[in-house]
């Protein structure tokens, strides 16, 4: 525990800066909104009576139970989708592993409401699949009905969290551990159960807890499927009605925050006392082996089946974007390029804005995420856990609440030289995105950090490196795969964020893509242009993700080929 | 060195700003920009934007699309440092909220030749804050392919929608989510009376496939064939049809025509341009844009209808549209939030229970038809009565103290209100849930007798 005894002033300073940032852009705006939950609606005095009302209302108890049920089931289904994809692509020599990893991540980069629109068209009560089933066999399957529909859409949407984090963890497992186990006679299931699975555990738990939280808090999907009896929609419906200031919406928001923190805490407890870090870096990732002929067919069949389901929203969106009229029929009536033409003529600024905003936000996230992860897990700064709790708590803040909080807090602050309220300056959108996506990056950074042994750092410091130098030259380079994963997750999801953005956009020239999609999807004249814009979003983020996957792969290969104990950068 | 350079550039920037301020012409006929917050779809805003910019070269129209509720919140939150010139949306009640908060500026319209009323509703705000620029009324929209495939008759009146044949085929938005939906609910309540009005709504809602979160969810569901029949505002139906979807639209006898509105926001940064924009909306040129197949709203200038396509409804000639109900705005205003909350408690959040009870009653009735079983008939009637039951009476709904529980209350710290909305809603919810369950049991009992 030597690292915990010395606290260089720089570390404390960084921690303070982070704390101030989180206070200013997360705590203060949110408190400005949710303090209503603790206010007696009659007198304005501080009270818990609203929480008593919450538990006295059958509807809220029911919503609470439904939200829990949906979140658990979504984690389960998402795991079933993600495990084979992660395992096959990291464990075997598999054609186009990077492609599969990329395609598997693509669901994340579609705003959930867009995904749900496309899935309705394909799997809805009168969607393509059911119309065909009805015509051929005379029955239909209620894929999208009620809670099952929410679970279906959510698990397809959020399983990439498990995939990304699990793949990063698997790629980081030291080959020498696997080799030692094999030398000692462990093979097959035993090897997986005793070595691979425990070592990949931090990645899996990180991913699964994210899925749980996101589903628990997700608003777009239940709203689009018109499922009201869940907590997040109840909060939203109550907060966003005109002229009503019923405190229950805010009470539910508080419940969402509390519950998210509770489940995170549980995942901390689950991981506590287990040391997953490997000292050596004998080579990134497990040994990959070739599949036999029949194994190969089986593996491809599983992967292709999973990908087909997972990519169905994109398929539906593509049809919608090229289609003319699509109404109560298996496929659109005719096909056209008019939607794309319209989009390219009118919407190019959305694309550049999105690249700028999401890129900046993801950069902030990775830098801050690494700093927070390091401070929380590798230093003894007082109150360091709170940085983690705070940053992660952003997950539980509905975007609408954050958006309203920003308007309420920053509208009176004028930015010098631009002479505009801070709340209507485009930078505030970047900050909102960064805050909202920081938890994702943070989880990825923590998982990456967990796999870098503290002893390596201590060794560097024993050899005379300063804290800053050891972090820069040892810790960060060893975390790079996880950091890239964090960057990609933040970037991809920030690119399609809508709920806070829509509150903060003050001029069309500053608006990002998700706003453009939302606006174009509102037309009774058809959603073709919105779908076309959605496809462009998917392609942009897809290409970005693919490129960074390539970078990770390349980096991993270099590490392996160098055969050095200390990876690139450390030798200099 | 570095700091001095920054200092120099900062100073010069500040100087430039000051110079720009001084040299800017103090009184200009019109600013070069107008910023509009609107809930209208792109098809509508783009058409007006390009026509306006073509007519007034040098003026840019900046359109910010937010849905009505978010738009109201946005204006409320940014009032201290307002950057918006115009608020442009359908629901008159959203404007009422803004007016009540003192966030709108009065404006005297220069355009002439606009009638006082559309249907039975005044076109412009009598207090002079917001101006109607187009009419809209609620009606029934259906998907031709859907009704053909499911062999459904085409509905004409609200009461048609309560028929068993439409079970699970109807969609609507919640009044708490959409101001225009609220008007429809209130119109039926006023047209048929409180008790009967709610009974009608619940009979219709028993056939709902879904209650959508946004009003746009309804035309969307009908267009895509998710459900076959929707209760929608006319332009959704008319413009969907105009864009080629296999859908059609009809006004039932009991409907209210209401104006869609525009208002200048208080302390608008570009007041002259905003005024010119409003006048443009009211001009013949602006009104004609409303007939665009992707827009299809009712112009407020009667002579424009001469240019409308065949079959386009004309409220200034066809007096059956929107005239059956004398809409009482004060009554509506007094219980606005209460009606929303009641609808949500009884219908939106308990839709599954309501549907189950309705289905059981419809099945029992179908079986009972022609058999003359008095006991079964009594049980069914009792079940219907339980479903129709409303937790409060009309007098209570208009009781100011009671309605205040649901209002944005406490403007000052000294204001006192008794009762909490959550408390009242929980009580209603228990009663409603119980009644639906009992009604279902009674209907099943009746069916077992047959």
Image (cartoon, coloured by chain):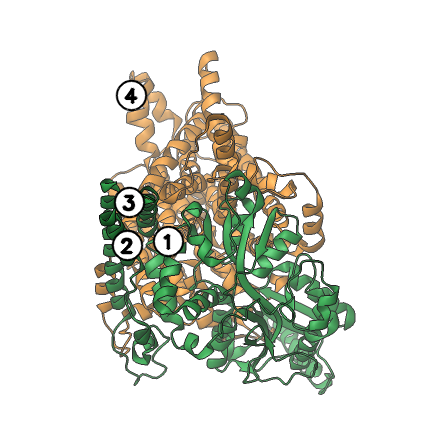
Residue B88: which quarter of the image? bottom right
- For discs 2 and 4, the disc positioned in front in the rendered view: 2
Query: Which residue lies under the disc numbered 4?
Result: A190
SS for callout 1: loop
Q: In this orientation, does residue A42 appear?
A: yes
Q: Are marks 4 and 3 in contact (CB under 8 Å)?
A: no
Q: Quadrant of residue A254?
A: bottom left
Location of residue B185 in the rendering, given as x and y in whole percent from the top left corner: 44, 65
Q: Colour of chain A?
A: orange
> Mark 1 to mark 2: distance in Å?
30 Å
Secondary structure beneath label 2: helix
Which chain is indicated by disc 3? A
* The label number, if any, that marks residue B381 in the structure image: 2
* Local crowd size for mark 3, using a 10 Å CA cut-off: few (<14), some (14–19), many (≥20): some
Chain coloured green in the rendered structure? B
Binning the other alpha carbons within 10 Å of mark 4 as few (below 14), some (14 to 19) or many (20 upward) gives few
For mark 3, what is the residue?
A267
Q: Nearer the viewer, mark 3 or mark 1?
A: 1
Report the chain holding disc 4: A
Q: Looking at this rendering, what residue extends furthest in the top direction?
A: A293
Mark 1, residue position: A228
User: Of the residues tagged 1 and 4, which is closer to the observer?
Assistant: 1
What residue lies at 48% left-to-right and 37% top-to-bottom? A123
Q: Secondary structure at mark 3?
A: helix
């Amino acid at each position: 525990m030597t690292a915990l005894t010395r606290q260089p002033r720089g570390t404390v300073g960084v921690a303070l800066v982070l704390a101030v940032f989180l206070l200013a852009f997360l705590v203060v705006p949110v408190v400005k909104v949710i303090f209503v939950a603790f206010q007696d609606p009659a007198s304005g005095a501080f009270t818990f009576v609203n929480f008593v009302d919450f538990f006295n209302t059958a509807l809220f108890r029911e919503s609470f139970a439904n939200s829990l049920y949906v979140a658990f089931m979504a984690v389960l289904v998402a795991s079933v989708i993600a495990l084979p994809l992660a395992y096959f692509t990291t464990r075997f020599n598999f054609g186009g592993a990077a492609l599969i990893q990329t395609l598997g991540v693509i669901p994340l980069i579609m705003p959930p409401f867009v995904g749900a629109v496309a899935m309705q068209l394909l799997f809805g009560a009168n969607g393509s699949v059911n119309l065909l089933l009805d015509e051929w066999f005379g029955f239909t399957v209620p894929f999208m009905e009620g809670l099952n529909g929410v679970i279906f859409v959510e698990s397809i949407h959020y399983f990439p969290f498990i995939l990304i984090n699990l793949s990063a963890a698997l790629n980081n497992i030291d080959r020498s551990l696997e080799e030692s186990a094999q030398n000692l006679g462990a093979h097959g299931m035993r090897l997986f159960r005793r070595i691979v699975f425990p070592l990949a555990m931090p990645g899996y738990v990180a991913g699964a807890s994210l899925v749980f939280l996101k589903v628990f808090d997700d608003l777009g999907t239940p709203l689009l499927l018109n499922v009201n009896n869940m907590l997040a929609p109840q909060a939203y419906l109550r907060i966003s009605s005109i002229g009503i200031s019923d405190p229950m919406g805010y009470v539910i928001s508080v419940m969402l925050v509390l519950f998210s923190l509770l489940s995170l805490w549980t995942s901390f407890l689950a991981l506590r006392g287990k040391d997953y870090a490997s000292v050596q870096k004998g080579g990134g990732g497990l040994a990959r082996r070739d599949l036999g002929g029949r194994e190969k067919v089986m593996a491809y069949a599983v992967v292709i089946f999973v990908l087909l389901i997972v990519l169905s929203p994109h398929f539906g969106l593509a049809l919608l974007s090229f289609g003319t009229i699509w109404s109560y029929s298996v496929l659109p009536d005719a096909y056209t390029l008019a939607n794309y033409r319209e989009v390219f003529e009118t919407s190019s600024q959305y694309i550049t804005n999105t690249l700028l905003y999401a890129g900046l936000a993801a950069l902030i996230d990775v830098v801050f995420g690494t700093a927070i992860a390091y401070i929380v897990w590798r230093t003894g700064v007082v109150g360091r856990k709170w940085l983690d709790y705070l940053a992660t708590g952003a997950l539980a803040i509905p975007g609408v609440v954050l958006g309203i909080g920003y308007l309420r807090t920053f509208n009176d602050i004028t930015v010098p030289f631009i002479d505009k309220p801070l709340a209507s300056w485009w930078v505030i959108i970047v900050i909102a995105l960064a805050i909202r996506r920081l938890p994702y990056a943070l989880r990825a950074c923590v998982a990456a950090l967990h796999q870098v042994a503290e002893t390596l750092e201590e060794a560097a410091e024993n050899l005379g490196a300063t804290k800053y130098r050891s972090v820069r030259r040892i810790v960060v380079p060893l975390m790079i795969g996880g950091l890239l994963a964090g960057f990609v997750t933040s970037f991809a999801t920030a690119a399609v964020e809508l709920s806070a953005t829509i509150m903060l956009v003050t001029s069309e020239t500053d608006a990002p893509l998700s706003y453009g999609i939302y606006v174009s999807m509102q037309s009774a004249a058809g959603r073709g242009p919105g779908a076309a814009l959605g496809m462009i979003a998917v392609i942009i983020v897809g290409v970005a993700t693919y490129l960074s996957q390539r970078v990770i792969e390349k980096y991993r290969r270099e590490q392996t080929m160098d055969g050095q104990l200390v990876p690139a950068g450390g030798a200099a | 060195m570095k700091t001095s350079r920054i200092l120099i550039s900062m100073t010069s920037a500040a100087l430039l700003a000051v110079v720009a301020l001084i040299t800017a012409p103090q009184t200009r006929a019109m600013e070069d920009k107008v910023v509009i917050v609107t809930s209208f779809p792109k098809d509508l805003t783009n058409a007006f934007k390009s026509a306006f910019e073509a007519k007034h070269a040098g003026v840019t129209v900046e359109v910010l699309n937010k849905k009505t509720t978010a738009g109201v919140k946005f204006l409320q939150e940014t009032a201290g440092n307002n950057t918006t010139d115009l608020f442009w949306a359908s629901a008159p009640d959203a404007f009422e909220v803004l007016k009540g908060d003192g966030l709108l500026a009065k404006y005297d319209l220069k355009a002439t030749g606009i009638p006082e009323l559309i249907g039975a509703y005044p076109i412009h705000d009598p207090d002079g804050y917001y101006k109607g620029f187009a009419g809209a009324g609620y009606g029934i929209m259906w998907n031709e392919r859907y009704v053909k495939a499911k062999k459904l008759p085409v509905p004409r009146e609200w009461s048609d929608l309560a028929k068993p044949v439409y079970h699970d085929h109807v969609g609507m938005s919640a009044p708490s989510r959409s101001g225009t939906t609220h008007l429809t609910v209130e119109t039926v309540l006023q047209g048929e009376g409180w008790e009967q009005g709610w009974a009608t709504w619940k009979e219709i809602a028993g056939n709902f496939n879904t209650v959508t979160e946004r009003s746009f969810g309804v035309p969307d569901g009908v267009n895509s064939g998710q459900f076959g029949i929707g209760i929608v505002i006319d332009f959704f139906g008319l413009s969907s049809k105009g864009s080629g979807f296999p859908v059609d639209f009809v006004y039932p006898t009991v409907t209210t025509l209401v104006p869609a509105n525009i208002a200048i926001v208080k302390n608008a940064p570009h007041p002259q341009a905003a005024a010119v924009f409003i006048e443009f909306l009211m001009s013949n040129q602006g009104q004609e844009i409303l007939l665009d197949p992707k827009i299809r709203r009712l112009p407020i200038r009667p002579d424009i209808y001469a240019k409308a396509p065949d079959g386009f409804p004309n409220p200034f000639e066809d007096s059956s549209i929107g005239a059956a109900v004398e809409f009482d705005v004060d009554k509506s205003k007094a219980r606005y939030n209460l009606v929303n909350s009641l609808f949500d408690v009884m219908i939106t959040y308990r839709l599954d229970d309501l549907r189950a009870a309705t289905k059981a009653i419809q099945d029992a009735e179908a079986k009972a038809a022609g058999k003359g079983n008095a006991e079964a008939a009594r049980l069914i009637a009792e079940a219907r009565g339980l479903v129709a039951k409303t937790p409060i009476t009309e007098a209570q709904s208009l009781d100011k103290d009671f309605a205040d529980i649901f209002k944005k209350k406490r403007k000052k710290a000294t204001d006192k209100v008794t009762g909490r909305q959550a408390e009242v809603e929980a009580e209603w919810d228990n009663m409603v849930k119980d009644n639906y369950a009992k009604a279902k049991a009674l209907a099943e009992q009746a069916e077992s007798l047959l």
